[in-house]
Image: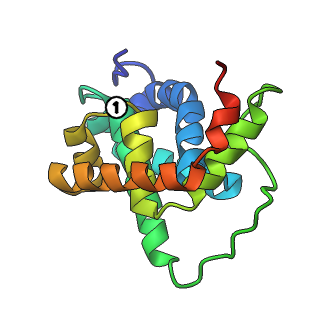
Amino acid sequence: MRWGRSSGRDGREGYAEFAAARAGHLYRSACLLTGGDTHLAEDLVQEALGRVYLRWDRVSQADNPAAYAQTVLTRGFLTHQRRHSTRRERATDVLPEVCGPDAAGEASLRLTLLAALGQLSAKDRAVVILRYWEDRSIEEAAAAMNTTPAAVRTRCVRALARLRALLGDALGEYVSP
C-alpha cells in the first residue's frame, strides 16, 4: 500500500492512516524486543511513530515505509538499552502484564518464550525478532541494526543456541505428538 502525500494538508491524513495501520504491529514487535515490558514497548512505539512523522514527507515516498518504521523502532530499542544498561531494573520471574490477547492454551507458551527472550542480550533479542518475527533477510536485519550481515549471522546462531539452552525441554510439553 502506498501512503502518498496527496491526501490532506502536508500528508497528515496519510500519516494518520499509516500510524493507525502499523501501530499494533509495531507494539507487538516492541513487546517482544522488551521482553514483555509493555510500558517501555508503548514508549518505543510512540518514539518511533514520532520520528516517522517528522520525516513523513520523505518516508511516504519510500518503497516500504513500514520497514522504515520497524527500523526506527529497533534502533530506538537498542539506543535505550545502551543508555540504560548501567541502571537496569532487576528482572523477576513474574510478569505484570503480557502483550496482546492470549488464547487459553497459548498463555504458558507465550510466558515461557517471553521469559527466555528477556534473558537474551538486547542485540540478540533484536536479531531474533527481526529475523524470525519480522521475517527480515539477513541484509535487512543488518541495515536495521546498523551492522554487517556477518555480525547478524553470528549473533543469530549464538542467540538461537542460547534460547535452546534456556528453554531446554520446556517446549516439549507444548508440542503435540
In depth, the one of 69 and 111 nearer the eye is 111
Q: Residue at x 70, y 37 (%)?
A: 109
> Callout 1 environment at 10 Å: few (<14), some (14 to 19), or many (20+)?
many
Number of marks in the rendered image: 1
In depth, the one of 174 and 14 nearer the eye is 174
Q: Residue at x 32, y 50 (%)?
A: 157
Q: Residue at x 17, y 48 (%)?
A: 149
In x, y percent, where is residue 141? 28, 44
In depth, the one of 35 and 105 nearer the eye is 105
Q: Residue furthest top?
A: 1
In x, y percent, where is residue 115? 65, 54
Residue 44 appears left or right of 124: right
Q: Residue furthest bottom?
A: 86
Q: Quadrant of the C terminus?
A: top right
* Visible residue check, residue 8: yes
Q: What's the amino acid at mark 1?
A: Pro
In depth, the one of 54 and 115 nearer the eye is 115
* Visible residue check, residue 99: no
In x, y percent, where is residue 86? 52, 84
Q: Which residue is mark 1?
A: 65
Badge 1 element: helix
Is 145 situated above or below 68?
A: below
Q: Quadrant of the N terminus?
A: top left
Q: Residue at x 45, y 43 (%)?
A: 129
